[in-house]
Image (spheres, coloured by chain):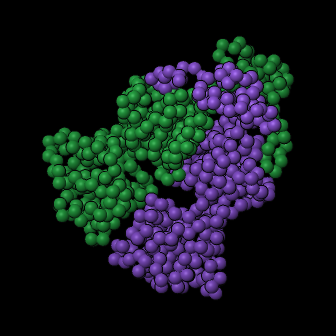
Chain colours: A purple, B green
């Protein structure tokens, strides 16, 4: 078809005129077929000849031209602040991309690693490309400031939120997730359940604790405040609270996240104790490389990053309603594995 | 400046004409300043007035128009096959983006999850946007086929390669990495060193084994073939080979990756054994959420995903030479932690 250089570049680009000549129609007709123009009066036979010519010649539409005529692009910008350090941004991007493609849009992803200058560059770039709108996301669920440039386009916050503005946000349902995790243990008959909360002030810290309380209330159980502990949200935190948990005589532990559970497993094993026989454990996040491969594999509650990406695009494009200033809370599903046994 | 609706959309876009009026210059002058046109004869004072007007009015250039005039965009396509399941694609993207921005280019990232239809859509989209070129990447280092559409643009393979074609590739130096990992143990006096290789046929399997052999040869040591074991490349694999390693009486183990090392740690701990006192362990990958938080933290060799992204862009843009059909091998650096002690 076209000859290739060593670098793979086609020697020339097929034009709309060449397609028209091959199909025996006008360039206007080709344009209408290629761009799927609604209401264009084109006979089925002519349309088929155009499509055949497109295939035969390997014609690629020039979206740059189409976007310019329309005045906007089919781009949706997505700002991510930590694409390289956690798996969560990747899941948001995957969800957003799949939903964007379903709606004929394309993502312009920019990673900022939280750097303000990079963020300004990213937003400027997106605005220069006349994006349909921008999803502004953070790797962890938190409050955020809206950068000035973000306000120049339609935007939705993903996994973050601002208070007291008209900005719409799509976030995880932390309260529901905390309740789900606690229910896993209550449902197996556990009544002395510790909650190892994060030391980091965050909606996760407040929300999951509220869920823990709601789960107890729903079964008529009392929360023993002494069973609510704080630990840093990583393996070292879980390892460090083990002694205290054992002294408290709890039978089950809801850990702030899977990393904390991994550290707790280490501490229990050092003492010759077993999960779930000696201690039932529930994590949070569903960080698969950990939760799926601890011994035994860890029951946990997933953060719905993929779904956050999907819903963010749907809200942005108006496929789903969300009022100004409202937060859409996406539920956190159970991932049941083997770290809980009946009490 | 511009008034905002609840969704954040600006009511109107500032035009180049408005900038020209405010600065008291022609639209042509504004265009030359904004587009940084080389050789344009514009006085310093007029240039400063344009820049001030741009800032005052919040003018955003229309890159859609500029791209159309040039006939290509400043986009570089990046195809990723697993953005949501491993952290590695994110690191490639981060490196590629940072290098692309340094050269005034913007990434168009598309995630395919290895699906062929998604891949065709991704490449078609990139070609329609007249990308400068395409980086085609895989989450793990492997041989690949070149999709037909990829050949329609300049392209470079990242973390993958094809045999016997003119395609250029940027890949990790597996042999060097295997050698580095083995050297960490040899340097501490270990002489009975096991290598737990992956069962998956791959350049990692062949390359790291070759590096293990080269490291022994360089110190005049003999390789005992009985110390080369195969295990599945995850925690369960490392857990399963522990018995055999102990029976072989090795003092140090080079594990195919950090996940294998994590499984081995579990098995050792179950037997009341300690790392590094009873067994020195080296991993590979530097999957930080594991390697940085095992007890003790794991010494390992990093896969240079970030650097692969950077070098891929440099080769694509011609900032770095690479001959047709050649593979650029990027070195795998040591990440020394606490899992090795002197023999």
Residue B104 pos. (x, y %): 59, 29
Q: What count of labels does the image hold? A: 0
In the rendered view, would you say A309 is above or below A61?
below
Q: Give coordinates of residue B135: x percent, y percent.
A: 50, 35
The residue depicted at 83 percent of the width and 48 percent of the height is: B5
Q: What quarter of the picture does the C terminus of chain B occupy?
A: bottom left
Q: Where's residue A2, x and y in %?
A: 53, 22
Q: Is residue A249 visible?
A: yes
> Does residue B325 lie above or below B222 as drawn?
above
A321 vs A283: above or below: above
Which corner quadrant of the image does residue B261 belong to? bottom left
Name which residue lies at 52% across and 63% down: A286
User: Which residue corresponds to the image point at 64% horizontal and 45% vertical from the top-left?
Assistant: A101
Horizontal placement of B173 versus A236: left or right? left
Figure quadrant of residue A273 = bottom left
Q: Quadrant of the N terminus of chain B?
A: top right
Q: Nearer the viewer, residue B339 or A93?
A: A93
Q: Seen in the image, is B154 located left or right of residue B46?
A: left
Q: Nearer the viewer, residue A138 or A50?
A: A50
Q: Position of residue A195 (x, y in %)?
A: 54, 75
Q: In this rendering, would A206 be left or right of B78?
A: right
Q: Is residue A243 visible?
A: no
What residue lies at 47% left-to-right and 51% top-to-bottom? Answer: B86
């Amino acid at each position: 078809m076209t000859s290739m250089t060593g670098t793979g570049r086609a020697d020339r680009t097929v034009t709309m005129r060449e397609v028209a000549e091959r199909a025996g129609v006008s360039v206007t007709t080709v344009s209408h077929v290629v761009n799927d123009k609604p209401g264009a009066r084109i006979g089925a036979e002519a349309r088929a000849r155009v499509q055949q010519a497109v295939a035969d010649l390997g014609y690629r539409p020039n979206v740059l031209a189409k976007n310019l005529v329309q005045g906007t692009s089919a781009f949706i910008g997505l700002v991510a602040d930590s694409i390289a350090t956690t798996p969560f941004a990747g899941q948001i991007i995957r969800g957003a991309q799949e939903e964007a493609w379903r709606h004929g849009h394309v993502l312009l992803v920019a990673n900022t690693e939280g750097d303000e200058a990079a963020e300004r560059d990213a937003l400027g770039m997106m605005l220069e490309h006349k994006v349909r709108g921008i999803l502004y996301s953070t790797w962890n669920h938190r409050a955020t400031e809206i950068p000035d440039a973000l306000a120049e386009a339609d935007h939705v916050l993903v996994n973050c939120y601002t208070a007291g503005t008209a900005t719409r946000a799509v976030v995880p349902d932390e309260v529901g997730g905390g309740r789900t995790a606690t229910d896993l243990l209550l449902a197996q008959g556990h009544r002395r359940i510790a909650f190892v909360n994060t030391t980091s002030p965050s909606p996760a810290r407040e929300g999951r604790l509220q869920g823990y309380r709601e789960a107890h209330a729903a079964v008529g159980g009392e929360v023993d405040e002494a069973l609510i502990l704080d630990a840093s949200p990583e393996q070292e935190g879980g390892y460090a609270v083990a002694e205290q948990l054992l002294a408290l005589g709890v039978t089950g532990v809801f850990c702030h996240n899977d990393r904390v559970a991994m550290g707790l497993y280490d501490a229990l094993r050092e003492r010759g104790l077993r999960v779930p026989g000696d201690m039932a454990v529930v994590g949070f996040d569903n960080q698969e490389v950990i939760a799926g491969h601890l011994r035994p594999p860890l029951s946990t509650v997933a953060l719905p990053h993929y779904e956050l990406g999907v819903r963010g695009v749907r809200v942005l494009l108006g496929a789903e309603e969300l009022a100004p200033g409202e937060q859409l809370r996406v539920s956190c599903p159970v991932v049941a594995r083997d770290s809980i046994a009946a009490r």
